[in-house]
């Protein structure tokens, strides 16, 4: 469904229109965006990856351009590197944590300043995607505005965006306030959010075996019974 | 016995004769579409599949836009016969199997990773490992449970008549009456909730014999 279709359904159920309830109409589009962000943030349902080019001698890099919300995995030169707390790093390497150069094996996150730091500090510049930082991260659903746009939520979960807007509309401190209806739509929205979270968490087998060359391989198997039939709580 | 889903419009009008002038066919169709989305997601009864031809060196492919859950991913070396299933994995599994999985290539993928929730616009993808550096017609077939994202998708849809009366009409009635007496509307929602388990049981094709069937083939 598009934003416009969700709005049409909203007015079907809410009754009236934007002329009768201009205050409700003003919050409608933003409310749909809020619902998308709420669904995506708790379920980690939107994942993307970005690349940050490194500069020799530079330890910290901004995450602003990646749009990263939650960092899931980081690699340097296509090999995974492990997370370490910034202060733990300082305690472990008090002499030189911010000076030693080499091949980064660890990364730390500076959430307040939205930065990622490497240890050791890269000693070479990135070239054609090599010697660069690769980040897998969740993406917050962005601001929506156009009625023709499709909300950034699973298409089967678009009704839950409608439920969220109804909940918020009936919760407004205005003449549209109706606590009983607000409770109903809130309950339906929260049930839907749990279903989004359940479907985002894909169960996978965890049994590995050793190949002849010493590498590990994931053993085949489908412990999840498909279709999964997510049951109500 | 199956009927067009749009036959639910006349059933709904019979349920609420007092609302004859209030509800247009378009509005009732919108309510039926919401019902269809809810039923497809709750019961996983709509099966679908999508073929994708692999391209040189590419690891990521767009997942079907109407997917609710990716169930299996099959692989074909010749693009015609599907003779193997890919193993579901996640990024941590790939890290454990190979430090350099991001740049590995091979003769064909053995694993797939679901990126983002199925059905998410733009971001929902299937990651295959290992990708093939030079392809020659290889394909994957994604088998999944689906929904019908657009109300226009319902035009020629048929469903068993008893499903229309058991779940589609009650859910649609809830949506249509929600702008009035909320308690009356909730009664229809309760009826839907009471019947949805029947629909799940009816379309549960797995059964207890799954393990026995798998054991027969091991």
Image (tube, coloured by chain):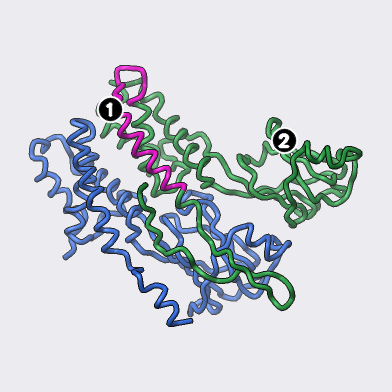
Q: Quadrant of residue B214?
A: bottom left
Residue B138 location, x and y as percent?
A: 56, 74
- Dot 1 alpha-carbon crowd within 10 angstroms: few under 14, some 14 to 19, many 20 or more: some
Residue B61 makes an appearance in the image: no
- Dot 1 falls on a residue whose secondary structure is helix
Can you identify the residue that label 1 sits on? A180
The residue depicted at 24 percent of the width and 58 percent of the height is B198
Residue A150 location, x and y as percent?
A: 44, 43
Q: Quadrant of the N terminus of chain A?
A: top left
The residue depicted at 45 percent of the width and 41 percent of the height is A151
Q: Chain of mark 2?
A: A
* Residue interval drawn in magenta: A170-197
Residue A189 shown in magenta = yes
- Identify the mark nearer the N-term, 2 or 1: 2
Chain B tint as drawn? blue
- Looking at the colours in the rendered structure, which chain would you say is drawn in green? A
Relative side of A211 to A35, left or right? right
Residue B34 makes an appearance in the image: yes
Residue A78 shown in magenta = no
Q: Nearer the viewer, residue A223 or A41?
A: A223
- Does mark 1 fall on the same chain as mark 2? yes
Q: Nearer the viewer, residue B110 or A26?
A: B110
Relative side of B212 to B176, left or right? right
Does residue A2 lie above or below B138 as drawn?
above
Can you identify the residue that label 2 sits on? A110
Q: CA distance from mark 2 to mark 1?
A: 43 Å
Residue A25 location, x and y as percent?
A: 36, 25
Does residue B121 lie above or below B160 as drawn?
above
């Amino acid at each position: 469904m598009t934003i416009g279709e969700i709005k049409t359904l909203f007015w079907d159920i809410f009754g009236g229109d934007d002329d009768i309830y201009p205050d409700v109409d003003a919050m409608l589009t933003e409310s749909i965006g809020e619902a998308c962000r709420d669904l995506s943030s708790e379920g980690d349902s939107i994942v993307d990856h970005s690349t940050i080019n490194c500069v020799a001698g530079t330890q910290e890099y901004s995450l602003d351009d990646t749009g990263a919300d939650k960092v899931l995995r980081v690699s340097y030169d296509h090999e995974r590197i492990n997370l370490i707390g910034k202060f733990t790093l300082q305690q472990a390497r008090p002499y030189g944590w911010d000076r030693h150069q080499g091949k980064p094996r660890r990364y730390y996150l500076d959430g307040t300043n939205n930065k990622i730091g490497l240890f050791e500090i890269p000693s070479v510049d990135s070239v054609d995607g090599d010697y660069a930082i690769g980040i897998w991260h969740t993406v917050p659903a962005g601001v929506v505005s156009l009625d023709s746009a499709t909300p950034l939520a699973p298409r089967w979960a678009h009704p839950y965006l409608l439920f969220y807007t109804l909940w918020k509309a009936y919760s407004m401190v205005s003449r549209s306030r109706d606590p009983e209806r607000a409770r109903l739509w809130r309950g339906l929205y929260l049930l839907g959010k749990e279903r989004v979270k359940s479907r985002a968490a894909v169960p996978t087998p965890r049994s590995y075996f050793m190949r002849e060359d010493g590498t590990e391989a994931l053993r085949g198997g489908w412990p999840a019974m498909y279709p999964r039939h997510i049951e109500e709580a | 016995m199956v009927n067009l889903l749009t036959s639910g419009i006349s059933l709904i009008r019979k349920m609420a004769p007092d609302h004859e002038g209030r509800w247009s066919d378009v509005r009732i169709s919108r309510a039926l579409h919401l019902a269809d989305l809810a039923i497809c997601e709750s019961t996983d009864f709509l099966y679908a599949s999508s073929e994708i031809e692999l391209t040189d060196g590419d690891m990521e492919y767009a997942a079907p836009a109407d997917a609710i859950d990716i169930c299996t991913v099959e692989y074909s070396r010749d693009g015609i016969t599907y003779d193997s299933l890919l193993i579901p994995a996640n990024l941590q599994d790939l890290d454990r199997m190979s430090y350099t999985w991001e740049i590995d290539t091979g003769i064909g993928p053995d694993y797939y990773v679901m990126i983002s929730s199925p059905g998410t616009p733009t971001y929902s993808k299937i990651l295959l490992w290992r990708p093939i550096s030079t392809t020659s017609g290889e394909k994957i077939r994604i088998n999944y449970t689906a929904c019908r994202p657009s109300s226009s998708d319902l035009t020629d849809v048929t469903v068993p008549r008893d499903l229309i009366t058991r779940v589609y009409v009650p859910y649609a009635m809830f949506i249509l009456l929600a702008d009035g007496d909320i308690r009356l509307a909730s009664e229809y929602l309760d009826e839907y909730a009471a019947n949805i388990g029947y629909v799940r049981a009816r379309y549960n094709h797995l059964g207890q014999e799954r393990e026995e069937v798998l054991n027969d083939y091991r």
